[in-house]
Image: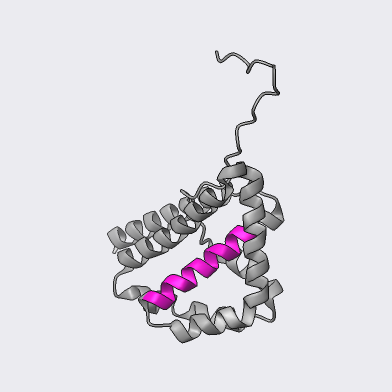
Amino acid sequence: RNKMRRLLSSLAAVGLLAAQQAQAQLECLSPTERSAIQVAALRSQLMVLATGCQEDNSYNAFIRKYQSDLMSNERMLEEMFKHKYGRRGQQEHDRFTTELANAESTAGLKLGTDFCAHNGMIFREVMALQSAADLPTYAAGKNLVPAAAEVCQEVAQKPARGKAAPAKR
């Protein structure tokens, strides 16, 4: 019994640490950018659930209900990645989207047959939201952005023409 309590306490601590790391890596973002990232992570999770749990109809209903807001969110992400990464913006955006899907798929593999049962309520919860304005808060509460997802790296600034780059020490 005590071993089980220690195990559960350890698992809870690891989960909390992972959530704190994921949240900390989003601190460089404005609240609007952070919300866009979190909504993208929610959409990714729902896509993985749809694929892995035969929930295509639920996913399609989610897309139909929030389509215009999801499209606006995607445009915001494109602009954010373009601003942060310059010419590599689309490449970095694609990489990030792939990282989200891979993280969800990996989590699904770890849960095995419990994945669908463990996450099945999400479709009902998200469809019960009052409006699309509730998506960012809902997504933030789910801590879906993996800690390894890199969104805060800035493009290295090039020195002005004719000026030498500062010497490295």
Q: Which residue is at 40% across, 59% downward?
A: 102
Q: Is residue 49 left or right of residue 83?
A: left
Dominant SS of magenta comes to helix
Residue 156 lies, in percent from the top left, at 60, 32
Q: Is residue 149 left or right of residue 129?
A: left
Residue 157 lies, in percent from the top left, at 64, 30
- Name of the residue lying farthest toward the front: 162
Label total for image? 0
Q: Which residue is at 64% across, 69% downward?
A: 71
Q: Is residue 122 left or right of residue 37?
A: left
Residue 106, compared with residue 117, is above or below; it is above
Q: Which residue is at 36% across, 73% downward?
A: 115
Image quarter for residue 49?
bottom left
Residue 92 lies, in percent from the top left, at 52, 49
Which one is in front, 154 or 38?
154
User: Residue 38 colored magenta?
Assistant: yes
Give the quarter of the figure containing the N terminus: bottom left
Residue 4 in view in this figure: yes
Residue 88, compared with residue 138, is above or below; it is above
Which one is in front, 62 or 68?
68
User: Residue 68 colored magenta?
Assistant: no
Which one is in front, 83 or 150?
83
Image quarter for residue 111?
bottom left
First to last magenta residue range: 35-51
Residue 38, compared with residue 92, is above or below; it is below
